[in-house]
Image (spheres, rainbow, N blue to C red):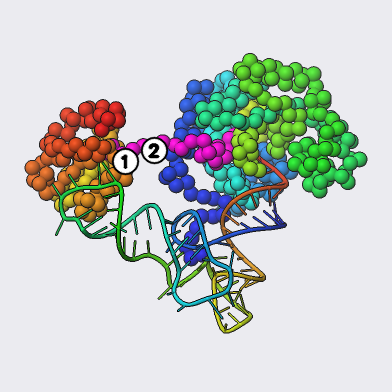
Amino acid sequence: MGSIQAIRGTRDILPDEVSTWQFVEATAREILNRAAFREIRTPIFEQTDLFARGMGEATDVVSKEMYTFLDRGDRSLTLRPEGTAGAVRSFIEHGLQAQGGPQRLWYVGPMFRYERPQAGRQRQFHQLGLELLGSGDERADVEAIAIATDILQALGLKDLKFDLNSIGNGIDRTAFREALVNYLTPYKADLDPDSQDRLTRNPLRILDSKDQNTQRILDGAPSILDHLSLESKARFDRVQQLLADLGIACNINPRLVRGLDYYTHTVFEIQSDDLGAQATVCAGGRYDGLVAELGGPETPAVGWAMGLERLILLLQKVQAAPIVKTDFYLVSRGAQAEAQALRIAQQLRQAGFKAELDLSGSAFGKQFKRADRSGAAACLILGDAEAENRTVQLKWLATGDQSELPQAEIAQYCEDWRRLIAQGTV
RNA sequence: GCGAGCGUAGCCAAGUGGUUAAGGCAGCGGAUUGUGGUUCCGCCACUCGGGGGUUCGAGUCCCCUCGUUCGCCCCA
């Protein structure tokens, strides 16, 4: 290993791939804007305590997956493992609730978790998420979900599975946990080792165990939906009704629980079959207690996050992002001509064209080869003769048509060229 | 953190103990010294992720290590 390479679990997104990222981000941005969500940008590291309190000390993410370090002032800092805690901290710190009405926020950026890399899972990965803070109305849940499905649809993703559940309020959950533990305890020896461990630690998470035998045992287990209070039940029914009104199909999955402690009532997950083990592409839910937990005013809220690497993995199976072709490729030789070509390139760019300047100084033949590869519509050619006469040769590469024109007249041709290139006839 | 597979050029690769490490793509140079896409020719790994060992001899076998891939766990 002579040369330095990217840290395990991180990777470079090279120019060929960036166009896909930009497509995803632009698509999401447009849809979020239309729904009156506003972008928020928060630091990528925070006090460790924020995540510990927000997600729950006992969660796997907090207990073993955080990038935590001491800075030079001996403060314990953590690279954010998710976006909600930072957004909520910012909401509280700047008193955004005082702006009146619910706050509709969204974010995109890198997140960090110290996990073993795998298909669709890295140590630095990217999430795009939204938080709708300040409304407990069922319509807020559904609005948030509808935006997620809009984005996925606009990206052209199909065959996604949308699972929905309600985990009720804290009281509902305590009652259910007890019922579940009572049911499972006699089977303890038959559960898989991880689930045995979770029986005392975090019994709800046994529900989504991948172990076949555990799942069989769960077939007879009590359902969270039978332990919801009348109010929680009515709330869940209303959410389902509103989703149906919007034509959003979902599968009620009473075994869907989420890994972070802050969720209440609505939880959901959107998965793909084409991603291997890390199938979840978007997940979220309601978190009515979190803002208060982090020291803010009692504020109901709902949100979700999408894993961009996973979306892009899916997109690469569906479609290739279009490449923006060069309009003009500038070929030049000789000091005077090269200087003029540089100036003309600038002029064309300022006029809105994509212009690429050949910097090689090599033979014209070589420069034309590169022009061809760039996919340019036309070449502008300057040699000693053109430099002397203050002219330029214009050659349309598709047809081979070539003409000479004075450099001073370039500006007046721009409109014609723009039209010709747009028509794709040259 | 646990389990399994894989590391040969920028990329895809052949090679499975015996003299000089196939081939393709890309790239570079030339045929074509002011005109591209085709074609032809040439160049492009003192060395097989790194280290150690076995052997007369190792890209090929063994050990360690790093990376990577897939799965478990967990999650977006």
Q: What element carries label 2?
A: loop
Q: What element carries label 1?
A: loop
Q: Toward which corner of the image does residue A398 lie, by quadrant?
A: top left
* Residue A227, image quadrant: top right
| N-term mark: 2 or 1 | 2
Categorize mark 1 by other alpha carbons within 10 Å: few (<14), some (14-19), many (20+): some
Percent across and percent down for residue A331 are 21, 46
Q: Which residue corresponds to the image point at 47% horizontal and 46% vertical from the top-left?
A: A13
| Residue A79 versus residue B60 in the image, above or below | above
Q: Is residue A270 above or below residue A195?
A: above
Q: Tag 1, which chain?
A: A
Q: Quadrant of residue A140?
A: top right
Give the residue number, with chain letter if any, for mark 2.
Answer: A323
Q: Residue A115 carries which label?
A: none
Quadrant for the C terminus of chain A, please: top left
Residue B18 is left or right of residue A186, and the answer is left
Residue A242 included in the magenta stretch of the image? no
Q: Tell me which amino acid carries mark 1.
A: Gly
- Residue at position x 65%, y 30% in the image: A161
Disc 2 marks a residue whose amino acid type is Ile
Q: Position of residue A193 (x, y in %)?
A: 81, 48
State the residue lying farthest toward the left: A389
Looking at the image, which residue is at 51% across and 50% down? A11
Q: Is residue A137 visible from the viewing direction of this image?
A: no
Residue under circle 1? A375
Please give the range of residues in magenta.
A305-328
Marks 2/1 in contact by CB < 8 Å: the verdict is yes
Name the subunit of mark 2: A
